[in-house]
Amino acid sequence: MPLIGLIFAAILTKQRKYIILGITWAFLYFGVSYTQQQKAISEVLKLSEKRNVEVLYIEAKPSLANIFIWKIITTTEDKYYVDAVKIGPGKSIVWEGENINKLSIERDLPWLKEGSQQRKDIERFRWFSNGYIALDRNNPYQITDIRYSFLPQKINPLWGIELKPEADKDAHAKFYNARHNREGAVKTLWGMLLE
């Protein structure tokens, strides 16, 4: 928000100092964000050692509207681990999250025909989700993008695709948006920030 305010101030007043302040703010913000991200990754690497898992890749994203709590997705050979880390003054806090098996069409959807449109839709969704897809725990016909959720340590996806075993070979999978308790999640996230 400060950057947007400084841009408007520069446009309205036509004063160069607001441009300089805006650029300075952007560099400081991205510098602090990068430092926070690296610290969060370091904390999750320690957690991965305790879990005794071989890490293939780690992705760290800031949680909703802040750079203090980070959602960390750790990829192993067959699973995704989702954890949250709060980096602030003093000691870091790690919230051990959930894990889920990576999607395996052969294991999870043996009924899905090779060459069917739904199978092609899964591959399109895999591309869209940067590979972070899994079978929903609550619905064996839904495939979810695990990268985004209201709470950073949870695998409670915001969207996915739904398959139908009885569908024709040319039938598309259906895209869906999940409905969750957003107010409760915001309250929980706020509590995590204040912890």
Image (cartoon, grey):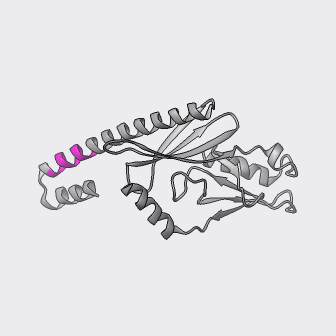
Can you say which quadrant of the picture contains the C terminus?
bottom left
Horizontally, residue 147 falls left or right of residue 11, namely: right
Magenta region: which residues?
Answer: 18-26
Instruction: Examine the structure image and report whether residue 94 is included in the region drawn in magenta.
Output: no
| 130 horizontally vs 194: left or right | right
Q: Nearer the viewer, residue 122 or 48?
A: 48
Question: On screen, 86 above or below 177?
Answer: above
The quarter holding residue 157 reads bottom right
Q: Quadrant of the N terminus?
A: bottom left
With respect to residue 194, does 29 lie above or below? above
Answer left or right for 43 relative to 179.
left
Residue visible at 65% across and 64% down? 176
Q: Quadrant of residue 163?
A: bottom right
Residue 33 in picture, x, y percent from top left: 35, 42
Magenta segment's dominant SS is helix
Percent x, y of residue 91: 37, 41
Magenta stretch contains residue 20: yes
Give the number of marks.
Answer: 0
Residue visible at 87% across and 50% down? 113
- Up-down: is 72 above or below 11? above
Residue 34 vertical placement versus 159 (above, below): above
The residue at 50%/68% (across/down) is 184
The one of 77 and 133 positioned closer to us in this rendering: 77
Image coordinates of residue 103 in percent, x first then y, are 73, 45
Q: Position of residue 28 (x, y in %)?
A: 26, 42
Indicate left or right for 187 with 76 as reference.
left
